[in-house]
Amino acid sequence: MEPRADFLIIGSGIAGLRAAVELAGAGSVVLLTKAEPREGNTGYAQGGIAAAVGPDDSPELHAADTIAAGDGLCDEQAVAVLVGEGPGYVRELMAWGAAFDRDSNGFPALAIEGAHSARRVLHAHDSTGREISRVLWSKVAGLPGVQTLTHARAVDLVLRDDGRCLGARFLLDDGTVGSAWAGAVLLATGGAGQVYSDTTNPPVATGDGLVMAYRAGARVIDLEFVQFHPTALRVPGHPRFLLSEALRGEGARLLNEDGEPFMRQYDPGGDLAPRDRVSRAIERETRRTGHPVYLSLQHLDPDFVHTRFPLVTDTCRAAGLDLARERIPVGPAAHYLMGGVETDLDGRTSIPGLFAAGEVACTGVHGANRLASNSLLEGLVFGARAGRAMTLGERSRHETGSTAVPRPERAAAAFGIAEHEVQALMWRHAGLFRDEQGLHRALSTLEELWRDLQGRNGPAGALDLGTWRLVSLVTLGRLIVRAALRRTESRGGHYRTDYPERDDIHWKRRVGERRRSSAEF
């Protein structure tokens, strides 16, 4: 199977779909998605999408909040693009039929979330990502020349001898190997939360696009900055589930075992402090008391709670809890990767012909800690910009080429380690709290696995889907740990107990890396 098109999009979340809208009028488009089209992180985004559309807000205020949350590392030009262009793209969604919640006067009902200074978060109950995905899929479905290939896991980028990206190799669920060829390629593969044992991300979020780009020689950056969402459901026997920050925005309180609010003891921002600080406070309070921390909406009107948060209500009910009437046990979980494949403001990577947008990419817009509800906006704004940029300039059309990216051939079982052990290793040593000793311990294990993985080469068809998943997790884990060891300070989502202070003299800068040699896997 070898589909050919002018443009190839890998990923079916908000960034990829918005790019497809831009590209459809300029040529043929092939869209690869590794599972069902709506299984990515976009559909799991509950809280909303932030944009300065309210009467008491402005792009300047939104920029100031984004930069403050980013803890000194935001690229201010990228922030200006995000907040300046964002309102127009949100209004475009509404014109296309996005059913955001409205107030009694018919205007968008704007919520407030942690580290925002104004109400600017539009929402569709607590399923905002699903609603945006629905609208974008409806838009894309009506466009000519867009072909969607589902259950196609991209495993390698294909490079011409001069280094230009010409497409990607993919693996279908039945083991069939295929190649998709295009004049320009967009990585819109989303996040990487599955590298940790506790995560709010869906099973597909294994960092494949970032890993493929790194192995092809692209520069990756800011990978030490992992955002841990403070309030994931913690009920034994049930998966971690995101309890949206919008809950606290509507008045939910964080309480300890004795029913006491505790956040002011750790941070002046209280329950609505930036996510990195709330997450660490929850973990510290849990360790101090030896008991869970709870989210409580018991002081709010039950009808309002159940109506405003139907998805969270149903999820809590399935775990035997009433969101409105009982305390809900919560704890931090890996949620978002601020770093990624380095791009300019139009999605261009360091590899000619290769673009990236959304969570897989890193423009520097989030700095060291993403402001709540900026992720969906990022996908819209930078997905559209990447799509436009892909239509410009000279493109190689339907050429075939060669790739020097080696691939492992042994099965995952041969490495003597299971996927969940990698995830547990990352949670224990490269999670909320990090130090040199633990990071070195994690790196030693991951380097051994890395050497095993690059020990032998073989055709992509020699590997099953489970092995490719392990390849992604080990590769990404190694990159995160190396980045965390490099940065000897604490900032945003990166916290070193052996270097607990922010160090602007030495570390007010962003650091990236490339694959060290063509012989390295």
Image (cartoon, grey):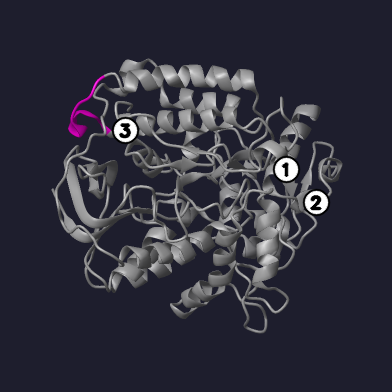
Q: Quadrant of the C terminus?
A: top left
Q: Secondary structure at mark 2?
A: loop
Residue type at mark 1 is: Arg
| Pointer 2 or 3: first along the chain | 2
Q: Is residue 463 magenta?
A: yes
Is the residue 74 above or below the residue 225 in the image? below
Residue extent of the magenta highlight: 456-464
Disc 3 to disc 1, C-alpha distance? 34 Å
Residue at horizontal 65 percent and vertical 24 percent from the top = 435
Q: What numbered label is drawn on residue 219?
A: none
Q: Is residue 5 magenta?
A: no
Disc 1 to disc 2, C-alpha distance? 9 Å
Q: How busy is the neighbourhood of tag 1: few (under 14 within 10 Å), some, or many (20 plus)? A: many
Q: Position of residue 507 (x, y in %)?
A: 65, 38
Is the residue 180 above or below the residue 76 in the image? above
Residue at horizontal 68 percent and vertical 30 percent from the top = 496
Q: Which residue is mark 2?
A: 269
Q: Nearer the viewer, residue 237 or 371?
A: 371
Q: How busy is the neighbourhood of tag 2: few (under 14 within 10 Å), some, or many (20 plus)? A: some
Which quadrant would residue 304 be assigned to in this image? bottom right
Residue at horizontal 18 percent and vertical 33 percent from the top = 461
Disc 2 to disc 3, C-alpha distance? 42 Å
Q: Position of residue 295 (x, y in %)?
A: 72, 47
Q: Which residue is mark 3?
A: 468
Q: Which residue is mark 1?
A: 277
Q: Secondary structure at mark 1?
A: helix
